[in-house]
Structure formats: structure tokens, C-alpha cells
């Protein structure tokens, strides 16, 4: 039975365009070619690598934030092979080549390997950021010490096929610890940082089948970090309450729509309490749960999100005190002569009312993710005022073309968080 559940993870059409857990949805309508009124037509820049993931972080600990593009796999002949590189870029908005990689560090593994998740933190408190990466089809994490990030400085043992990482201070001792969701073992490994590059497993949490993504937050407002994970095998969102000593207690399980893709934690209605959202490719919705501040999430609703919603970002574009959504849609267009993996974008704006649920939002506005006529399978969305002009912009991964699209904001000043 586990093998049958695992088949969607193979992403046979294009592993560069897929994340683990992607499932394909056949449609007969092409992707949108409309350019959105809130954003300028995308400026697309080719990259030396193709990836669905974009991550913003201070890669080299110099105080400047870089754009990181991890490369899980690359094309090779008619198929794909593992890669594992992480490339860093700076933003040069006024330049025609607005991403620059000159003189920036990149990491290349000694052996090609699919690293599905990584975190960057100063784990040993020496002033240099370190990297911890998952290793596919193994029971190991790699700890690479900054500033050189030499390969295999240390190897940490977790469960089989770690797929998602979070770094946080689980026991409030001032050092960053690690949590790893293990798809092959249906578990979460809690690793505590004892200093001197030494981590010990403090707990193993049992999850539903095939955990896919792990997130952290504070569900009950006690200033102790809690955890949440989504599992694609049973379509469940599971919540754990942190006790502040490195241990966690499972408090609830919430049903997700089928094929959950991305989990996001934010205060969507700006009431001071954290909420949860999960995208669903097959159900074509974002399911949102409003938190009550005590650790419970009961007021759920499904928000229409376009075809095949996968990655998404949140911000208050129209500054009405409710967070809005920008969503990457991925789907298959099946014509009589060809089947194409493609997609588009959706902007879901709040309507400025005090209502909750679907009544608080307008219908999705679909728009093109790329100038390419056949579209692309847009990946991660990063929302940010890239050029510092007071308007929120979008950066979107275009993995099939090995590009990144920049959408300059032109309508709303916007806010990244609640006022």
C-alpha cells in the first residue's frame, strides 16, 4: 500500500518542475496569458540552474539577504539525475540582469544528491552561518560548518528519507535545534543542539503516512515553539504543542483536502492569533483554519484558488487589514496531439469587509506566470519590495525554463504582515 501512495512522488514528467508530493491534474484549457493589472509584465532572467524552490536568507552572514536557488535534480539526456547544488544570487533591480551571482559562494556536493530541504543557522554560535541538509533515500542529515561549508563536516542520524527541516530553539537554551520530518518512517525527529557540533535525538514523534512539510509557530501564545506537519498519505494536518524542554505533545489532527501541497502559518485575518493554510492541487483550493489563540483551529473554510494550487505567498496587498494570497498553479493540459505540464498564477484579494471565510475574499484573478506561450510550472513565490519603491513585487520560479520571473508591483503599496 505504501508503494501505491508513493507513486505520485515520482513526478515522471519533469523532476525539475516538481516538488516531492506533486500530483498532476489533467485539464483541457490552456494556462492564462493575461497580465495582471496589479503587476507589470514579468521580467524573466535565465539561470544556470532550474529549480522550483526559492529561498531568501543571509547566505554568507554579511548582513545582506541573498536569493538562494537549490537544485535537487538536473536534466541529463532524455531523463534526470540528482544534483544537489545551492546557488546564491544578489538582487540588482536596476540592471537588465537583475540577479547577480558574481563572487557569491555556492555549494556543490562532493557527490550529486537530491537535497529536498535545508536550513541555515549559526548552530555553533561562532558568528558564521552553518547549513543542515536532508539527504534523499537515507537516514542522515549533513551539517556543513560555515564559512567554508566543507562537505560532510558531520552527519546526523534521523529517520528514513528526511524530507523537511525546521530549525528552532526547542528547549530554550539559546542554541538552535533541528526537527526533521521523515517520509520513509512516518515520523519527526527532534534533535537538540548540545554545542560543539553535537546533536542528540530527544524525541521521535509519530506522524500520519508520508509527512511532507514541517512548520513551526506558537499556536497557544505561550511563547513556546509548537510544530505542525502535513501528511499526503492520509490527508492530515497534525499539531504538536511544545513543552519548552525539547519534547512535544500531539494536540490535534485536522483533515486537509486531498493531495495537500504547502503549509503556511500566518495571521490571515490580523486578529493577533496565528492561523494555518494548506494548498490542495486536486481540490483546487486553499483550506484555511482560523486559530483561537488557545491552540485550537476549528473555523475552517475552502478558498477557491485556481487550477492545481501548489506554492503560495501571503501579504496584505490592498492594505485592508486582511492578508491576501498569490498562488502558483500547476496542471497538465491534454490536447489531442500533446500533453503539456504547465501552469499559471492566481491573485486572491480580500474585499475589505469584516467577514470571515470565503466572504472575506474576491474570486481568484488568473494571470500568466511567463511570456512563454506554453506557460511553465511556477514554483515558489517570494513577495517583497525588491526595488524599494514602496510597492510589493513578486519573484516566481520558472523551473522548466530555468528562469526566475520578477513582477514589479504597480497598484498597491501593500504590507508583508498585519498592521
Image (tube, rainbow, N blue to C red):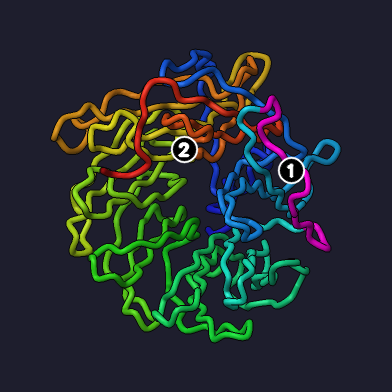
User: Looking at the magenta stretch, what is its main secondary structure?
Assistant: loop
In-front residue for pair 362/183: 362
Q: Which of marks 1 and 2 is nearer the N terminus?
A: 1
Residue 107 screen position, x and y as percent:
75, 57
302 with respect to 377 (left or right) = left
Residue 179 screen position, x and y as percent:
49, 70
Residue lying at 20% horizontally and 37% vertically, measured from the top left: 357
| Residue denoted by label 1 | 101
Q: Report the residue that reaches farthest toward the right.
A: 77
Dot 2 falls on a residue whose secondary structure is: strand
Q: Which of marks 1 and 2 is in front?
A: 1
Residue lying at 38% horizontally and 36% vertically, measured from the top left: 283
How many badges with numbers are in the image? 2
249 with respect to 210 (left or right) = left
Q: Residues within 10 Å of mark 1 (few under 14, many from 20)?
A: some
- 222 vs 120: above or below: below
| Magenta span | 95-112
- 227 vs 318: above or below: below
Residue 390 screen position, x and y as percent:
42, 31
Q: Does the magenta stretch include residue 153?
A: no
Q: Separation of disc 1 and disc 2 at Cα?
A: 21 Å
In-front residue for pair 207/103: 103
In-front residue for pair 195/333: 195
Dot 1 falls on a residue whose secondary structure is: loop
236 with respect to 100 (left or right) = left
- Point out which mark residue 383 bears: 2
Amino acid at each position: 500500500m505504501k508503494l501505491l501512495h508513493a507513486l505520485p512522488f515520482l513526478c515522471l514528467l519533469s523532476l525539475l518542475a516538481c516538488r516531492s508530493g506533486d500530483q498532476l491534474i489533467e485539464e483541457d484549457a490552456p494556462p492564462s496569458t493575461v497580465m495582471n493589472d496589479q503587476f507589470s509584465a514579468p521580467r524573466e532572467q535565465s539561470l544556470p540552474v532550474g529549480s522550483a524552490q526559492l529561498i531568501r536568507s543571509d547566505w554568507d552572514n554579511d548582513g545582506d539577504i541573498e536569493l538562494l536557488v537549490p537544485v535537487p535534480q538536473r536534466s541529463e539526456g532524455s531523463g534526470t539525475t540528482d544534483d544537489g547544488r545551492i546557488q546564491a544570487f544578489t538582487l540588482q533591480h536596476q540592471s537588465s540582469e537583475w540577479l547577480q551571482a558574481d563572487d557569491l559562494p555556492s555549494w556543490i556536493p562532493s557527490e550529486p544528491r537530491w537535497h529536498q530541504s535545508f536550513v541555515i543557522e549559526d548552530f555553533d554560535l561562532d558568528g558564521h552561518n552553518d547549513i543542515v541538509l536532508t539527504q534523499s533515500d537515507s537516514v542522515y542529515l549533513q551539517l556543513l560548518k560555515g564559512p567554508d561549508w566543507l562537505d560532510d563536516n558531520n552527519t546526523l542520524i534521523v529517520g528514513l528519507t528526511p524530507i523537511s527541516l525546521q530549525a528552532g530553539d526547542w528547549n530554550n537554551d539559546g542554541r538552535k535545534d533541528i526537527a526533521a520530518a521523515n517520509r520513509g518512517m512516518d515520523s519527526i525527529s527532534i534533535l537538540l543542539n548540545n554545542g560543539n557540533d553535537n546533536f542528540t535525538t530527544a524525541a521521535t514523534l509519530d506522524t500520519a503516512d508520508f509527512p511532507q512539510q514541517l512548520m513551526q509557530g506558537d499556536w497557544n501564545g505561550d511563547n513556546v515553539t509548537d510544530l505542525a506537519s502535513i501528511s499526503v498519505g492520509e490527508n492530515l494536518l497534525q499539531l504538536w504543542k511544545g513543552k519548552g524542554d525539547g519534547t512535544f505533545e500531539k494536540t490535534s489532527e485536522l483533515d486537509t483536502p486531498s493531495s495537500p501541497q504547502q503549509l503556511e502559518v500566518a495571521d490571515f485575518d490580523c486578529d493577533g492569533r496565528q492561523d494555518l493554510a494548506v494548498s490542495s492541487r486536486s481540490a483546487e483550493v486553499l483550506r484555511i483554519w482560523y486559530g483561537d489563540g488557545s491552540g485550537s483551529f476549528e473555523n475552517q473554510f475552502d478558498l477557491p484558488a485556481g487550477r492545481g494550487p501548489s506554492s503560495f505567498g501571503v501579504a496584505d496587498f490592498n492594505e485592508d487589514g486582511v492578508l491576501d494570497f498569490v498562488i502558483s498553479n500547476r496542471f497538465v493540459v491534454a490536447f489531442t496531439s500533446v500533453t503539456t505540464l504547465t501552469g499559471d498564477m492566481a491573485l486572491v484579494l480580500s474585499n475589505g469587509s469584516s467577514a470571515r471565510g470565503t466572504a472575506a475574499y474576491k474570486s481568484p484573478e488568473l494571470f500568466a506566470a511567463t511570456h512563454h506561450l506554453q506557460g511553465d510550472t511556477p514554483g515558489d513565490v517570494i513577495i517583497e519590495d525588491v526595488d524599494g519603491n514602496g510597492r510589493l513585487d513578486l519573484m516566481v520560479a520558472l523551473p522548466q525554463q530555468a528562469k526566475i520571473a520578477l513582477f514589479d508591483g504597480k497598484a498597491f503599496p501593500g504590507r508583508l504582515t498585519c498592521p
